[in-house]
Amino acid sequence: MTASATAPVTSVRPSAASSPAPRARRKRGRRLGRWLIAIAVLAIALLVGAMVGPAGLTARSVLLELVDALPFVQVDSGLTSQQRAILWQIRLPRVTLGALVGATLAISGASYQGVFRNPLADPYLLGVSAGAGLGATIALTQGGSIGNVGVPVFAFLGGLLAVGATYALGSTVGGGHSSTVIVLAGVAVAAFFSAIQTFVQQRFDDSLQAVYSWLLGRLSTNGWSDIWMILPYVLFSWVVLLLYRRTLDVLAVGDVETASLGIDPARVRLILVLTSTLGTTAAVSVSGLIGFVGIIVPHAVRLIFGASHRILLPLSMIFGAAFLVLTDVAARSLMAPAELPIGVVTAIVGAPFFLVVLRRGRVSS
């Protein structure tokens, strides 16, 4: 008998459950599953947003009307000419604007949190919204000479000035190392800009209604014009932020490690802050100040799907869009036929959520 015939079998064949191929398939399946869930949630939110209201639109009629709009397809949706006008000139522009604004605020909030390494960072706490509010207030109080055309430009300049002041003040006081100091600097800058805004409002009290309507947030539109106006800016900000999603993961490790890979952390931060501010101010210039979206959505996505910015940024966009469309439905429905400002609804939902995040952060620290 040979030695090979009597030797015990020591090698163990890897089970199918632990081999690399099934693990890779399961990983791809989970990745596909979360994208399908996100797209399904957004599709349902858009459909609900287009349906809900006194016009009596049904899900079937809305879907058939959308199918009828496709080239080379003709179906009868059963809608009257009045219902068709309401759908195409009021409901669809409104849900589209809500989706654009929600996606932009959510991805900007996630980017700010990655840049400043602070889970509480969002356009409100960094002073961007207050700066945009001051810029928009100045434009609105000037009437016809500047008018609605100047609101986005002034909002962007105000937001950019505020976030620049926050970053400069936080870096000077905190030595550029404390994200908590940067957030506190943002609170101080926001208070300062809000004070100036109040002063401007008192000087031009004939424009108070327009200013307050803008400050409380609204998604009412006059058709598709607002969407075409902000679309180039929000698309640009989405593309740039998504291109830097892997760099944000590297930035989270530390500046020294980031520099060792040949990446300039200061330059990356500047690009991301400017881009996030551009998207945020473009969104709020037509929707007004809508708070807490930049905190609620990224934290919920991070909690469910993980903290990697490769996943966090695109999923925050999708869920942010769905969240704001559904919030707008609530704002339209809770006191119908009256309509609540959407900023009030997001504040009611977001304030308790913010306290939970604050408590979790304190416990972690």
Image (tube, grey):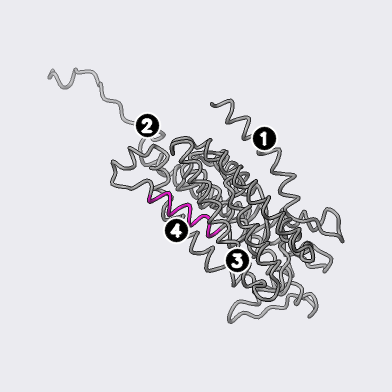
Spot occupied by residue 164 in the image (x, y as percentages of width and height): 50, 51
Q: Mark 4 sits on what residue? A: 240
Spot occupied by residue 187 in the image (x, y as percentages of width and height): 61, 42
Nearest the viewer among 300 and 4 is 300
Q: Is residue 216 above or below residue 89?
A: above
Q: Earlier in the sequence, mark 3 or mark 2?
A: 2
Q: Amino acid at mark 1?
A: Leu
Q: Amino acid at mark 2?
A: Ser
Q: Residue at x 30, y 26 (%)?
A: 12
Q: Earlier in the sequence, mark 2 or mark 1?
A: 2
Q: CA distance from mark 3 to mark 1?
A: 31 Å
Q: What is the span of residues highlighted in magenta in the rendered image?
A: 267-279
Q: CA distance from mark 3 to mark 2?
A: 60 Å
Q: Residue furthest front?
A: 203
Q: Is residue 276 magenta?
A: yes
Q: Amino acid at mark 4?
A: Val
Q: Which mark is residue 355?
A: 1
Q: Earlier in the sequence, mark 3 or mark 1?
A: 3
Q: CA distance from mark 2 to mark 1?
A: 47 Å
Q: Amino acid at mark 3?
A: Pro
- Which SS class for mark 3? helix
Q: Mark 2 sits on what residue? A: 15
